[in-house]
Image (tube, grey):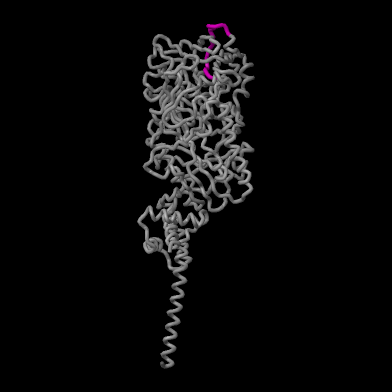
Amino acid sequence: MKRRNFLLVSFFALVLGLISLWYLKFKSATTKALGYPEELSEICDRKTLIHIGNTYRKLTNENTKNHLEELLLQDAGMMETKLKMNLRTKTTDDFRTGNTILVDGWLLSKTEARQCAYLSMSEAN
Amino acid sequence: MHTDARKLENNTKIEGDICIVGAGAAGISMALDWNKNGKNVILLEGGGFEYDNKIQDLYSGNSTGQRYYPLRSCRLHLFGGTTGHWGGMCAPFDPIDFKKRSWVSDSGWPITLQDLVPFYKKAQSLFELDTYNYNLHYWQKEYPAITPFPLDKDIIWSKMWQFSPPTRFGKTYKETIVKSPNIHLYTYANLTKIITNNTASSIKELIVKNHEGKTHKVRAKKFVLACGAIQNARMLLASRGVAKKGIGNDNDVVGRYFMEHLEIKSAELWLRKPISTELYIFDYSTRKPRAELALTERIQEESGILNGTASLTPLVMAKQQTPLIDVWNNEDPRKSFDKLVANFRKSREQNTSWQEKKGNRAFELFTRMEQAPNRNSRITLSNEKDALGVPRPQLHWELTHLDKYSLRKFYHILGLQMGKAGIGRVKLEEFLWDENDNAMPDQLGGGWHHMGTTRMSEDPNKGVVDANCKVHGISNLFIAGSGCFSTAGAPNPTLTLVALSLRLSDYLKTS
């Protein structure tokens, strides 16, 4: 291999590696944010959140991770901070607009209930 | 003056200008209002100055429908009446309580809150309360630490309570009554029959009896029944003579519309972060006013629900408490009262440790809600008679789907607001989960508040008394007390029933 080609391949491999690393980091951060109902986490422990998530999935048809991801990421930004902020706003808006659901007696925002469902599925995997 | 009716000659005739039957909160308040005014006031009390088991037994009765406390023990039959064991919580009704509400059948009083305000002010002093002011901002000046939750004021407000010591009327006002020159108190004078004239358009006399076998007759120009909502209805229904269906009962309303307050643990409030709850937590060591969470008039109307409030108790304390309906289950009111005190004491011990644990963020939400007026919720007479020959009362306590709907909706709204404000989350009790379930659980209690059995309405088909508490169709018979309430309101009834009685007293003086 010519030296020039070697450098080109190495460069692209490095870029691909960096992109993969960035994607993995992004994916992990997204997964973490999607499965972390911020306000509810200040009230309930992880076990309760997972239980709420499992019950929510039984109450609704939102039973796959992809579907939940799609619903939670609607209008959300790609960056972690923006995503967190978006989920926080969505949660408050849910209470404002009555987009809520009763799960095990808890009156919850649909967004946070979906986050619990997402968490419960991540946990199961 | 005081006379023990057991010591009178049999068949004594007692005469006066006005006769008040019953020396509880309503009767004593009225009598005091007539003190030293030159009129001859007869005040009849079935019991004496001390508890007497034989007398208390005259209150026994049965109940069907929604589970209820024993009728024998949920009132006190002695001078001072049920103030002998009341809790002292006082608050006026809200303006909405008097209004006709399209979503609440048979709601609406023929009077407004404003009509009662002068008498509320007067009633305050009888209960040894502070000034007649139930505005949060007023009390915040005195207690700056009492801050409300940062909730939407158009939706949720803080309803203030004041606390009477509590005033025991039997002890506090005994001397004034007994030494009065114009009030003549007769103890052991149990009303057993009301006698009308030949057309049942006025009351001629009352028959009173006691366990010693003495029977006396009482004559007056005006008669006021102030024996409590159950007993007043019972006596009207039992006094069948010229009026075949009972006195004031031509339209079959007497005894109907029995109402209580719906009192039950309904939800939990979990705060995200510790915030001041001082306004909402009852402090047992002081009489400092406190508040309960209530929904605004507009939200009640928009949601089509009844009026109610929610109180906060630290969950660690509340979890130690047995439902009141399971505590107050002894036929002897003294034993039931002791059990109630023990129940509260048990949770208060937890309170100490709770206060030590900074940052406790979980609370029980306990409901106090009006019951929707319901014709089928009623007092009738049983076939069984008491020792003095009066048929015993039979309570059928019946709730409607509006009661359950309102409870569920109340906490739904509260949950939304707590979430919207970022304060915390509300967790409903299981009996409120299913929207199609209209039944009330057996743990539902009442506040020992009996209301509505001789309700006020200008329409004789809808009520027993008119706006002046005069029985429809009877020229000289009046009813005092919570039996006259057209709707139950959210607060405990004692302050309002005394205000209403003082308004009646005022009317009788001027009419």
On the image, the x and y values in percent for residue B180 come to 62, 16
Going by the picture, which residue comes out furthest to the front?
A124
Is B298 covered by the magenta stretch? no
Q: Is residue B240 above or below residue B150?
A: above
**Of the pair A50 and B503, the residue shown nearer to us:** A50
The picture quadrant where one finds residue B23 is: top right
Is B9 covered by the magenta stretch? yes
**Residue A121 in view, yes or no:** yes
Magenta stretch: helix, strand or loop mostly: strand
The picture quadrant where one finds residue B475 is: top left
The picture quadrant where one finds residue B300 is: top left
On the image, the x and y values in percent for residue B22 come to 53, 19
On the image, the x and y values in percent for residue B368 come to 49, 37
Going by the picture, which residue comes out furthest to the left?
A61
Q: Who's the residue at 44% across and 63% down the image?
A: A122
On the image, the x and y values in percent for residue A4 come to 42, 91
Going by the picture, which residue comes out furthest to the bottom?
A2
**Of the pair B317 and B460, the residue shown nearer to us:** B317
**Of the pair B296 and B356, the residue shown nearer to us:** B356
Q: In this view, does B424 lie to the left or right of A65?
A: right
Which part of the image, by quadrant, shows the N terminus of chain B?
Answer: top right
Q: Give the range drawn in magenta.
A: B8-22
**Residue B409 in view, yes or no:** no
Q: Is residue B48 above or below residue A32?
A: above
Q: How many labels does the image show?
A: 0
